[in-house]
Amino acid sequence: MTDLAAHLQQIRICDTHEHLRKENDWVQDGPKDVLADLFQNYVPADLISAGASDEAVRDLTADGDIAKRFAAIGDAWSAIRHTGYGEAVRVLATELYGMPDDFTASDLVAAQSTLDGWRQPGGRRQLLEQTAGLDHVQTDDFCWPCPPDASGADFFFYDISWAGFCNGIVDAEALHTETGVTVSDLASLREAMSAIFDRHAPHAIAVKAQHAYARSLCWQERSDAEAATILPVVLTDGDKAAADQRQVLGDWCWARGCELAIEHNLPFKIHTGYYAGNDRMPVDRIRPGHLTPLLAKYLDCRFVLMHIAYPYSGELLALTKHYRNVYADLCWAWSIDPYSSADFVRRFIHTAPINKLFAFGGDTGWPTSAAAYSIQARRWLTRAMQAEVDDGLLSEASAMAIVDRILHDNQMEAFNVEAKKRPCLAATD
């Protein structure tokens, strides 16, 4: 093993994006068996693309005979073993469960005691901190509150979700429950939005929106007058608002979120590029280039563009190079397309400022998957950085310095992690 490879194995990684379920969910409602754990994350999408039936894929995480459930996806599994998603399954099987690469149903049954041991209080953090070697984890759990996590207030951090607002959804009842503000017009909506940040920003690590799943990333500046004509329709019956009306209100709300992120010194994370799942990805609306009016308007907002905007990674590279306020994040990308992700790192090094790249986030629900994805990321990043050294483009010392930045130092600075730990810990004392 080279010094570079050894360095990559021991460095503590800042994980910028997960959808981790809470401690009680993991202990009480986590995967029932090893088969379910291996195949519950993103790999079902590849299985379906390879020809597995929806029923067979659903049964992977259901009750019933493990051998029968595994056999039902056998042909599809053989076709996707070497995709990024398939590789992550094999990493989880071999590195965490100690099974052979060509594991069988009997291997799955024999590994059950390992899963049972992890699904105990504290097992979630142990997997992430010790097995995965993570410094901390940033989670989007699709809501506004970001209360300090009692199972690790200085380890588990949370994003304020802004996706609903960006989609032009204004849930007056939920806003009143959360903030005490009755939303009836733009002024009261602004008040409620500010109250969300006043309450949750001190403990939040970032703001997050994945509204690209429901609308274009195109943003236009909208006046108060434009938004004011649409808000009453949305408040009365949001389903009656046309998509173009919701986008106008969504753009207005999105802008307010950026302004509040600036005020409270929080980065704003945006899903760009690839969709999870199957058969519903209009590729034109996921391009990061659509964001340029927003990026130029709010130069004081730190925008984190996620998933290397796959397959538009060239656009993301250009945006990160050009805009002072844009950061690129490899979260999820290593499992979508590890080969392209390794290439992206190499191109980034020679194109954009290296302090603007974040190299890992698993984008998973269970800690076992996050740990497996971190191992996968370390392996592919090692290949990328070693190639830079072998090609004479970097010295080994320079490569290790870059690794320190993109796996740890950049994130600590951009997200003010050390400063966030203090109020989170104080709230749980």
Image: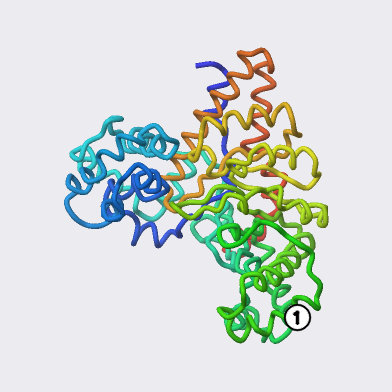
126 to 86, vertically: above or below: below
Q: Quadrant of residue 213?
A: bottom right
Image quadrant occupied by the C terminus: bottom right
As drawn, is 269 to the left or to the right of 119?
right
The answer to whether one can see residue 127 in this image is yes
Q: Quadrant of residue 259?
A: bottom right
Crowding at dot 1, Cα within 10 Å, few <14 / some 14-19 / many 20+, comes out as some
As drawn, is 362 to the left or to the right of 324?
left
| Residue in the picture at 73% in, 37% down | 355
| Residue in the picture at 64% in, 65% down | 162
Give 238 or 297, whichever is nearer the viewer.
238
Q: Position of residue 322 (x, y in %)?
A: 80, 40
As drawn, is 340 to the left or to the right of 72?
right
174 to 76, vertically: above or below: below
Q: Position of residue 334 (x, y in %)?
A: 52, 37
Q: Position of residue 141 (x, y in %)?
A: 53, 61
Q: Which residue is mark 1?
A: 228
Give 94 or 344, whichever is nearer the viewer.
344
Element class at badge 1: helix
The answer to whether one can see residue 429 in this image is no
| Residue in the picture at 18% in, 44% down | 67
Give 407 or 213, whichever is nearer the viewer.
213
Q: Quadrant of residue 166?
A: bottom right
Q: At label 1, which amino acid type do we have?
A: Ala
- Colouring scheme applied when the structure was drawn: rainbow
Q: Position of residue 255 (x, y in %)?
A: 75, 65
6 to 129, vertically: above or below: above
